[in-house]
Amino acid sequence: MTKLRIGLLFGGRSGEHEVSISSARAIARALTSDQNASKYEVLPFYIRKDGLWQEPSIAQEVLNSGVALQVHSGNSRVNLWQFPPQVAEIDLWFPILHGPNGEDGTIQGLLKLMQVPFVGGGVLCSAVGMDKIAMKTAFAGAGLPQVKYLAISRAEIWSNPCVFPKLGDRIETTLGYPCFVKPANLGSSVGIAKVRSREQLETALDNAASYDRRIIVEAGVVAREVECAVLGNDNPRASVVGEITYQSDFYDYKTKYTAGLADLAIPAKIPPEISARIQAMALQAFAAVDGAGLARVDFFYVEATGEILINEINTLPGFTATSMYPQMWAAAGIPFTELVDQLIQLALERQEVPKAV
C-alpha cells in the first residue's frame, strides 16, 4: 500500500513558536506509531521565526531536539518565498502553527493555493476564530450568550489627551472593574491584562495597542473555566467537558505553559445537564465560524446561577500529549494516535474537487 505523504508544518512567526514545536513532536510520534506507521510517511517542514521554510532534514533535527533554531540577520526577503523542493511531494498538509501567521487564515490561504488538502479549518474559520471581535460578532449572531465587552481601536487609545479620558469613562460605566484588556488577534493570553483601577486600565490599553490595532475589553466574571473539544466537518461531535483550575490571578501565558501551575479535570465535575448544554453550545460555536476538522471551545460556567457564557473558540489548539484538546478526546474514547488519523481523514473528506470549465 502506498503511504500518504503528510507535510507536518510547524514553528512559524508568532510568540507560540515553541508551543508549535511541542505540538509537532507529539503529532510526529503519533503518525509513526501503531497502524499510522503503515499508512503515513511524515515529511516535516519547519518555519523559522523569521519566516524561512526549512527542508525535512533540518526540520527533523528541530523535532529531535525540541529547540528552535537561532535566527541570524542578513537574510534576503526573496528567500521567504523559496520553498524546499520536497513541498511538491506532499499529499496532505498537517499545519500545527499556533497564533498569528499560523491559525489566522494566512497559512490556510497559502495551502489552499497549493491545491493540497490540509487539516483544520479554512481561511474564513481561521480568521474569524483568531480575531476576538469578529469571533464575538459571529457568536452574537448565533445567539450565544457572552460576557459584556467593548471593541476599541488603537486610534481611540492613541488619540489626543481629551479623547482618551472619555474612553476610560465609557469602559468604567459599561463594564466596571475588574475587567480584561486583550489584543484582538493574539493567542495564548499574550498582551492580556486583568485591571482593577483607572491607572491599570490606561496602562493595559496602551500595552494592548502596541500589539494590535484592534482591542477588546471584557467584563470580569466569577466563574469556573470549562472547555469542550469539537471534531468533524459537516456533522461534528463534541467531547466530554474539561475544567481548568489555577492559583494565579487569571489563566495567563505563564500559567498555561508552566508545568504544575494549572490543574485539568477531565471530565469536569459539573451536572450532566450543564455538560450537555456546553456540548451543544460548542457545536453552535463551531458552526457559527464555519469550523472544520477540529476546535476547542472555552466557556465560563457561573455555578451560582447556572449560567453558561461562551468565551472563545480556538481553531488550532495546542496538541501536545498533555494538551486539553487530545486529553478530552482520550477521555471520550479516542486515543491520540487515532485522533490524528481521524483529522487526516476529515481533511481528505473536505478536499474540494475543482469543477471542469
Image (spheres, grey):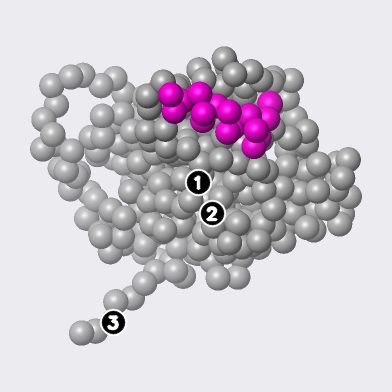
Amino acid at pointer 3: Lys
Q: Which mark is residue 242?
A: none
Q: Pointer 2: residues within 10 angstroms few (<14), some, or many (20+)? A: some
Q: Pointer 1: residues within 10 angstroms few (<14), some, or many (20+)? A: many
Sequence-first disc among 3 and 1: 1
The answer to whether the residues at label 1 and label 2 have Cβ atoms under 8 Å apart is yes
Q: Which mark is residue 137?
A: 2
* SS under mark 1: helix
Q: Which of 92/234 is in front?
A: 234
Q: Which residue is mark 1?
A: 133
Amino acid at pointer 2: Thr
Q: Quadrant of residue 219?
A: top right
Amino acid at pointer 1: Ile
Q: Which of 47/168 is in front?
A: 168
Residue drawn at (55%, 27%) of the image: 168
Instruction: From the top left corner, tell me how far across and down residue 205 is, in percent.
Output: 49, 25
* SS under mark 3: loop
Q: Which of 80/175 is in front?
A: 175
**Which span of residues is magenta-colored?**
162-178
* SS under mark 2: helix
Instruction: From the top left corner, tell me how far across and down residue 217 is, in percent.
Output: 56, 35
